[in-house]
Amino acid sequence: MTAAISVRGLTVRLDGNLIVDGVDLDVAEGEWVTVIGPNGAGKSTALRAIGGLLPHDGEIHWHGTPIARLHRRERAKAIATVMQSPVVPPAMGVYDYVLLGRTPYIPPLGRESASDLAVVDEVLAALDLEPFAGRRLDTLSGGERQRVFLARALTQGAGILLLDEPTSALDIGHQQEVLELVDRLRAERGLTVLATMHDLSTAGEYADRMILLAGGRVVASGTPAEVLTEANLAEHYRVRVRVIDGEHGPLVVAVRGNPNATV
């Protein structure tokens, strides 16, 4: 399969501190890869660098093209990023916020076209957001806002979707709603998804492959069953768990007790 994302030797330093240390990863077109790891492992930093949002060392290619060769508008047309807490202007309306996703297609000093508005209408309909189009973002629930953030990303028309903790601060019902939506859109639109997630069981249910980061390095990669092992989690999360076969992937259950004890 063709690699939509190819990363070699990704290294990121923030304020002189080494956060990501020589990470290699590939994501094939149409694949869903989820990056996991304990707090401070470098997950979000790596994702931001892959999205072209942070300075870095190493090589990052999108569809075979080095990101350094792409102009800002070309980058926005190729890849869309949904961060944990996007900055939203005060009193911003849902429709106007989603329309911001069409910015790469609007000429400087120009206005949105009828085709831009049509894209927004299509995405709002696809995500069942039409009833909220006239609402302000700050009046929506967490799950509703998360769908709006995703809608803005989809209006960019990018084939690669980067999701940083897409279910953070959501209850279990809204978590499932958002992830099922991403998975459906991936199938319908051929999207490539690279995500970071904390909930290991949920991550294992949706990802085709997983990458475990610890100390800024890749310490395990493979299918969810290959990465979510009791040994891996005990070593890198310092937690005592049991891993159970689930309907869609391994389920991780924390076990009370000494994390260094044998399960």
Image: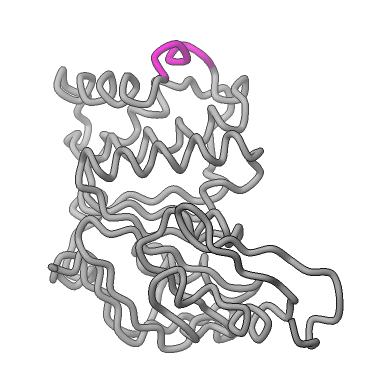
The residue range painted magenta reads 129-135
Quadrant including the C terminus: bottom right
Q: Find residue 194 and report its horizontal and vertical position in percent.
A: 37, 60
Q: On the picture, is 33 further left or further right than 94? A: left
- Position of residue 105 relative to residue 34, above or below, is above
**Image quadrant in which you'd find residue 46:** bottom left
Q: Work out whether residue 68 or residue 219 is closer to the camera in this orientation and state it.
A: 219
The residue that appears at 50% across and 76% down in the rendered structure is: 212
- Position of residue 87 relative to residue 209, above or below, is above
Q: On the picture, is 16 further left or further right than 61? A: right
The residue that appears at 35% across and 33% down in the rendered structure is: 100
Q: Find residue 216 and report its horizontal and vertical position in percent.
A: 53, 83
Q: Work out whether residue 33 or residue 243 is closer to the camera in this orientation and state it.
A: 243
Q: Is residue 134 magenta?
A: yes
Q: On the picture, is 232 further left or further right than 75? A: right
**Image quadrant in which you'd find residue 11:** bottom left
Q: Find residue 108 and report its horizontal and vertical position in percent.
A: 20, 37
**Image quadrant in which you'd find residue 241:** bottom right
Q: Find residue 146 and report its horizontal and vertical position in percent.
A: 51, 36
Counting the numbered discs, the total is 0
- Position of residue 247 relative to residue 1, above or below, is above
Q: As drawn, which residue projects farthest toward the right? A: 257
- Position of residue 43 relative to residue 133, above or below, is below
The residue that appears at 46% across and 43% down in the rendered structure is: 179
Q: Work out whether residue 149 or residue 54 is closer to the camera in this orientation and state it.
A: 149
Q: Is residue 171 magenta?
A: no
Quadrant including the N terminus: bottom left
Q: Work out whether residue 126 or residue 72 is closer to the camera in this orientation and state it.
A: 126
The residue that appears at 35% across and 83% down in the rendered structure is: 24
* Snapshot colouring: one colour
